[in-house]
Amino acid sequence: MSKAVKRLLFVCLGNICRSPAAEGVMQHLVNQRGLGNQIHIDSAGTSSYHIGEPADKRMRQAAEKRGYDLTSRSRMVSRRDGDEFDLIIAMDSTNLRTLSGMLVNSHAQIKLLSEYLSNDWPTEVPDPYYGGDEGFNEVLDMLEAACPNILAELQNDD
Ligand code: 4NP
Protein backbone atom coordinates (compact mmCIF):
# COMPACT_ATOMS: atom_id res chain seq x y z
CA MET A 1 0.00 0.00 0.00
CA SER A 2 1.18 3.52 -0.69
CA LYS A 3 2.07 5.64 2.34
CA ALA A 4 -0.73 8.21 1.88
CA VAL A 5 -3.74 7.79 4.15
CA LYS A 6 -6.75 6.53 2.19
CA ARG A 7 -10.04 8.19 3.05
CA LEU A 8 -13.24 6.16 2.83
CA LEU A 9 -16.82 7.41 3.32
CA PHE A 10 -19.94 5.22 3.55
CA VAL A 11 -23.26 6.86 2.69
CA CYS A 12 -26.92 5.89 3.23
CA LEU A 13 -30.13 7.90 3.68
CA GLY A 14 -30.34 8.58 7.43
CA ASN A 15 -26.77 7.79 8.56
CA ILE A 16 -28.22 5.92 11.53
CA CYS A 17 -28.48 2.31 10.26
CA ARG A 18 -26.54 1.08 7.23
CA SER A 19 -23.63 3.52 6.87
CA PRO A 20 -22.74 3.67 10.61
CA ALA A 21 -22.72 -0.14 10.56
CA ALA A 22 -20.46 -0.10 7.49
CA GLU A 23 -18.14 2.32 9.27
CA GLY A 24 -18.05 0.08 12.37
CA VAL A 25 -17.46 -3.17 10.45
CA MET A 26 -14.71 -1.58 8.33
CA GLN A 27 -13.04 0.10 11.32
CA HIS A 28 -12.99 -3.24 13.16
CA LEU A 29 -11.37 -4.95 10.17
CA VAL A 30 -8.81 -2.18 9.69
CA ASN A 31 -7.92 -2.24 13.40
CA GLN A 32 -7.63 -6.03 13.36
CA ARG A 33 -5.12 -5.79 10.50
CA GLY A 34 -3.14 -2.99 12.15
CA LEU A 35 -4.02 -0.50 9.39
CA GLY A 36 -5.68 2.11 11.62
CA ASN A 37 -3.21 4.85 10.72
CA GLN A 38 -3.40 4.16 6.97
CA ILE A 39 -7.13 4.24 6.38
CA HIS A 40 -9.56 6.89 7.62
CA ILE A 41 -13.22 5.83 7.73
CA ASP A 42 -16.35 7.94 8.15
CA SER A 43 -20.06 7.82 7.28
CA ALA A 44 -22.77 10.31 6.31
CA GLY A 45 -26.38 10.50 5.13
CA THR A 46 -28.04 12.06 2.10
CA SER A 47 -30.91 13.34 4.31
CA SER A 48 -31.04 15.71 7.26
CA TYR A 49 -33.64 13.57 9.12
CA HIS A 50 -31.42 12.39 11.98
CA ILE A 51 -28.54 14.88 12.19
CA GLY A 52 -26.70 14.63 15.51
CA GLU A 53 -28.30 11.31 16.52
CA PRO A 54 -26.35 8.16 17.42
CA ALA A 55 -26.88 5.03 15.34
CA ASP A 56 -30.31 3.41 15.67
CA LYS A 57 -30.47 1.32 18.85
CA ARG A 58 -31.56 -1.81 16.93
CA MET A 59 -28.54 -1.48 14.64
CA ARG A 60 -26.20 -0.86 17.57
CA GLN A 61 -27.49 -3.95 19.37
CA ALA A 62 -27.23 -6.20 16.31
CA ALA A 63 -23.71 -4.90 15.68
CA GLU A 64 -22.63 -5.31 19.31
CA LYS A 65 -23.61 -9.00 19.20
CA ARG A 66 -20.98 -9.41 16.46
CA GLY A 67 -18.35 -7.37 18.29
CA TYR A 68 -18.79 -3.98 16.58
CA ASP A 69 -19.06 -0.76 18.53
CA LEU A 70 -21.02 1.90 16.61
CA THR A 71 -20.06 5.33 17.93
CA SER A 72 -20.90 7.67 15.06
CA ARG A 73 -23.36 10.59 15.12
CA SER A 74 -25.46 11.30 12.04
CA ARG A 75 -24.26 14.03 9.71
CA MET A 76 -25.26 14.99 6.20
CA VAL A 77 -22.94 14.44 3.26
CA SER A 78 -21.59 17.68 1.76
CA ARG A 79 -19.85 18.78 -1.44
CA ARG A 80 -16.60 19.05 0.51
CA ASP A 81 -16.71 15.30 1.14
CA GLY A 82 -16.20 14.79 -2.59
CA ASP A 83 -12.77 16.37 -2.33
CA GLU A 84 -11.84 15.13 1.13
CA PHE A 85 -12.51 11.43 0.52
CA ASP A 86 -10.88 9.11 -2.02
CA LEU A 87 -13.69 6.55 -2.15
CA ILE A 88 -17.38 7.10 -1.34
CA ILE A 89 -19.55 3.99 -1.12
CA ALA A 90 -23.34 4.27 -1.40
CA MET A 91 -25.57 1.64 0.18
CA ASP A 92 -28.24 1.74 -2.54
CA SER A 93 -28.84 3.15 -6.00
CA THR A 94 -30.95 6.07 -4.70
CA ASN A 95 -28.04 7.20 -2.51
CA LEU A 96 -25.71 6.70 -5.48
CA ARG A 97 -27.86 8.93 -7.71
CA THR A 98 -28.00 11.65 -5.04
CA LEU A 99 -24.22 11.53 -4.62
CA SER A 100 -23.54 11.54 -8.36
CA GLY A 101 -25.69 14.64 -8.78
CA MET A 102 -24.15 16.42 -5.83
CA LEU A 103 -20.48 15.57 -6.33
CA VAL A 104 -19.90 16.42 -9.97
CA ASN A 105 -16.18 16.59 -10.89
CA SER A 106 -15.12 15.60 -7.38
CA HIS A 107 -11.86 13.89 -6.46
CA ALA A 108 -13.62 10.88 -4.93
CA GLN A 109 -14.60 7.74 -6.76
CA ILE A 110 -18.27 6.97 -6.05
CA LYS A 111 -19.36 3.34 -5.98
CA LEU A 112 -22.23 1.11 -4.91
CA LEU A 113 -21.50 -1.30 -2.05
CA SER A 114 -22.72 -4.27 -4.10
CA GLU A 115 -19.85 -3.70 -6.55
CA TYR A 116 -17.76 -5.38 -3.84
CA LEU A 117 -20.06 -8.42 -3.61
CA SER A 118 -20.55 -11.45 -5.83
CA ASN A 119 -23.72 -11.63 -7.92
CA ASP A 120 -25.58 -13.88 -5.49
CA TRP A 121 -26.02 -10.92 -3.10
CA PRO A 122 -28.73 -8.28 -3.61
CA THR A 123 -27.59 -5.20 -5.57
CA GLU A 124 -28.90 -2.85 -2.85
CA VAL A 125 -28.24 -2.89 0.89
CA PRO A 126 -31.91 -2.96 1.99
CA ASP A 127 -33.08 -0.15 4.25
CA PRO A 128 -33.80 -1.89 7.60
CA TYR A 129 -35.44 1.11 9.32
CA TYR A 130 -39.10 0.10 9.02
CA GLY A 131 -38.59 -3.67 9.17
CA GLY A 132 -37.83 -6.37 11.77
CA ASP A 133 -34.61 -7.49 13.45
CA GLU A 134 -33.62 -9.79 10.59
CA GLY A 135 -33.14 -6.72 8.38
CA PHE A 136 -30.33 -5.45 10.60
CA ASN A 137 -28.59 -8.82 10.45
CA GLU A 138 -28.94 -8.95 6.69
CA VAL A 139 -27.22 -5.54 6.48
CA LEU A 140 -24.38 -6.81 8.69
CA ASP A 141 -24.02 -9.99 6.60
CA MET A 142 -23.61 -7.90 3.45
CA LEU A 143 -21.14 -5.53 5.09
CA GLU A 144 -19.02 -8.36 6.49
CA ALA A 145 -18.83 -9.88 3.01
CA ALA A 146 -18.00 -6.60 1.24
CA CYS A 147 -15.52 -4.94 3.63
CA PRO A 148 -12.56 -7.29 3.00
CA ASN A 149 -12.98 -6.66 -0.75
CA ILE A 150 -13.10 -2.89 -0.23
CA LEU A 151 -9.95 -3.09 1.88
CA ALA A 152 -8.18 -5.21 -0.74
CA GLU A 153 -8.97 -2.60 -3.39
CA LEU A 154 -7.66 0.24 -1.21
CA GLN A 155 -4.48 -1.72 -0.55
CA ASN A 156 -3.92 -2.41 -4.26
CA ASP A 157 -4.69 1.13 -5.32
CA ASP A 158 -1.58 3.27 -5.28
P1 4NP B 1 -30.33 4.36 6.97
O1 4NP B 1 -31.82 3.99 7.44
O2 4NP B 1 -30.47 5.15 5.69
O3 4NP B 1 -29.70 3.04 6.79
O4 4NP B 1 -29.74 5.18 8.11
C1 4NP B 1 -32.86 4.92 7.55
C2 4NP B 1 -32.98 5.66 8.70
C3 4NP B 1 -34.02 6.55 8.83
C4 4NP B 1 -34.95 6.71 7.81
C5 4NP B 1 -34.81 5.96 6.65
C6 4NP B 1 -33.76 5.07 6.52
N1 4NP B 1 -36.02 7.62 7.94
O5 4NP B 1 -36.86 7.67 7.05
O6 4NP B 1 -36.10 8.32 8.97
Image: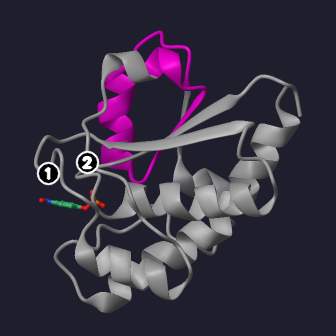
Indicate the position of residue 130 as horizontal and vertical percent values.
16, 76
Q: Is residue 137 left or right of residue 148?
A: left
Quadrant of the snapshot with the C terminus: top right
Q: Residue at x 14, y 51 (%)?
A: 50
Residue 119 seen in render: no
- Name the quarter showing ligand 1: bottom left
Q: Quadrant of residue 85?
A: top right
Q: Is residue 39 left or right of residue 95?
A: right
Q: Residue furthest left?
A: 49
Residue under numbered circle 1: 50
Residue 93 within the segment the image draws in magenta = yes
Q: Amino acid at mark 2?
A: Ser
Q: Amino acid at mark 1?
A: His
Q: Is residue 103 left or right of residue 15?
A: right
Residue under numbered circle 2: 74
Indicate the position of residue 100 as horizontal and vertical percent values.
39, 27
What separation in Å lies between label 1 and label 2 (alpha carbons)? 6 Å
Q: Secondary structure at mark 1?
A: loop
Indicate the position of residue 59 as horizontal and vertical percent values.
33, 75
Which is more N-terminal, label 2 or label 1?
Answer: 1
- The answer to whether the residues at label 1 and label 2 have Cβ atoms under 8 Å apart is yes
**Up-down: is 50 above or below 39?**
below
Residue 126 within the segment the image draws in magenta = no
Residue 95, which numbered label? Answer: none
**Up-down: is 35 above or below 123?**
above
Q: Is residue 131 left or right of residue 10?
A: left
Q: Is mark 1 within 8 Å of ligand 1?
A: yes
In the rendered structure, which segment of residues is drawn in magenta?
82-108
Camera-side residue: 129 or 44?
44
Q: Residue at x 40, y 57 (%)?
A: 20
